[in-house]
Image (tube, grey):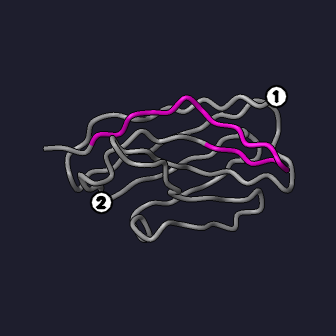
Amino acid sequence: QVQLVESGGGLVQPGGSLRLSCAASGIFFSNDVMGWYRQAPGKERELVATIIRHGNTNYADPVKGRFTISIDNVKNMVALQMDSLKPEDTAVYYCNLVRGLRKYWGQGTQVTVSS
């Protein structure tokens, strides 16, 4: 069983930055896919970014050029650096791990972008 714990959410003004972190219990396996998803009120959960252990990344179009996902294989952590934040980035952000056929989720952390 994998446990994921997010941290780093909060309130930020438009144009500001936040860094989210996700700590995973245990170690990362070579085929693990780590990712961040978000869910805004009244909307479905959507992909933000993914990364595999050796660093290949994928981003959703709305965040390309503004968000950066990274992985620390020693600390078993995944981070999401969010820059140039917009009000439409407001959502609960969830850490995700896909291992084979299993998916694991964190509890979520609220990000609010507002002046």
Residue 114, which numbered label? none
Q: Which stretch appears magenta?
A: 96-112
- The residue where tag 2 is placed is 84
Residue 73 left/right relative to 113: right
Tell me, yes or no, whether the highlighted magenta stretch contains residue 98.
yes
Residue 102 left/right relative to 82: right
Q: Position of residue 3 (x, y in %)?
A: 71, 28
| Quarter location, residue 39 | top left
Say what amino acid the circle numbered 2 marks: Ser
Residue 104 left/right relative to 64: right
Q: Toward the viewer: 96 or 67?
A: 96
Which residue is drawn at the image coordinates 38% and 48% (left, top)?
43
Q: Position of residue 42 (x, y in %)?
A: 34, 43
Tell me, yes or no, whether the highlighted magenta stretch contains residue 41.
no
Query: How crowded is the residue under tag 1: few (<14 C-alpha within 10 Å), some, or many (20+)?
Result: few
Which residue is drawn at the image coordinates 62% and 58% (left, top)?
50
From the image, which quarter does the N terminus lie in? top right
Say what amino acid the circle numbered 1 marks: Gln
- The residue where tag 1 is placed is 1
Which residue is drawn at the image coordinates 44% and 70% (left, top)?
64
Residue 103 left/right relative to 1: left
Looking at the image, how many numbered discs can be counted on the residues? 2
